[in-house]
Amino acid sequence: MSVGYQAIDNLICMKKSRDLLVLFKKELMNAQALEQEVASLHNLLFTVEELDHFVAAHELIDLTKYTIQNNSVEIKKSLKRKKANPFVFLNNKN
């Protein structure tokens, strides 16, 4: 079976734009099924990429104070700063 490579460019839904690369088997997917799959992927990614979910999955490690911050307000403040503090790292908990 051959595998088709379909690039979905500039998918615009809910005021969000992204580029997706969708791999599928040509024999099993028609254009309507592909559009439905891309819409499902977009909805899933839109939910996961919310700031609250992002903050819940990360922690701040401050090597100058030897602290680890799990407080969502502190993590959001750190993300909004225009200039990054030296030796302060954003770590994914996963």
Image (cartoon, rainbow, N blue to C red):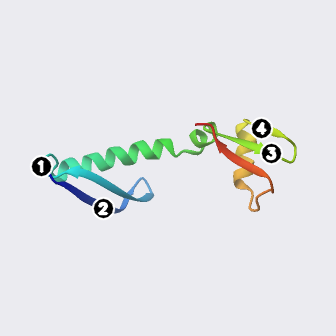
Residue type at mark 2 is: Ala
**Local secondary structure at mark 3:** strand
Residue type at mark 3 is: Asp
Which residue is disc 3 drawn over? Answer: 62
Is 59 above or below relative to 88? above
* In this picture, residue 69 sits left or right of residue 18: right
What is the CA distance from the residue labelled 2 to the residue labelled 4? 40 Å
Which residue is disc 2 drawn over? Answer: 7
Q: Where is residue 58 shown, x and y percent of the image?
A: 64, 40
Q: Earlier in the sequence, mark 2 or mark 4?
A: 2
Q: Which of marks 1 and 3 is nearer the N terminus?
A: 1
The residue sitting at 12% across, 49% down in the picture is 27
* In this picture, residue 63 sits left or right of residue 59: right
Say if mark 2 contacts mark 1, CB within 8 Å. no
What is the CA distance from the residue labelled 2 to the residue labelled 3? 40 Å
Say if mark 4 contacts mark 3, CB within 8 Å. yes
The residue sitting at 69% across, 52% down in the picture is 79
Q: Where is residue 26 shown, x and y percent of the image?
A: 15, 52
**Which numbered mark, 2 or 3, is in the foreground of this view?**
3
**Residue ranking furthest to the front:** 1
Which residue is disc 1 drawn over? Answer: 27
What is the CA distance from the residue labelled 2 to the residue labelled 1? 17 Å
**Local secondary structure at mark 4:** strand
Which residue is disc 4 drawn over? Answer: 68
Q: Earlier in the sequence, mark 2 or mark 1?
A: 2
Q: Where is residue 9 shown, x and y percent of the image?
A: 34, 64
Residue 48 numbered mark, or none: none
Assess disc 4: are there few (<14), some (14-19) or many (≥20) residues with their C-alpha within 10 Å of its C-alpha: some
**Residue ranking furthest to the bottom:** 9
Assess disc 3: are there few (<14), some (14-19) or many (≥20) residues with their C-alpha within 10 Å of its C-alpha: some
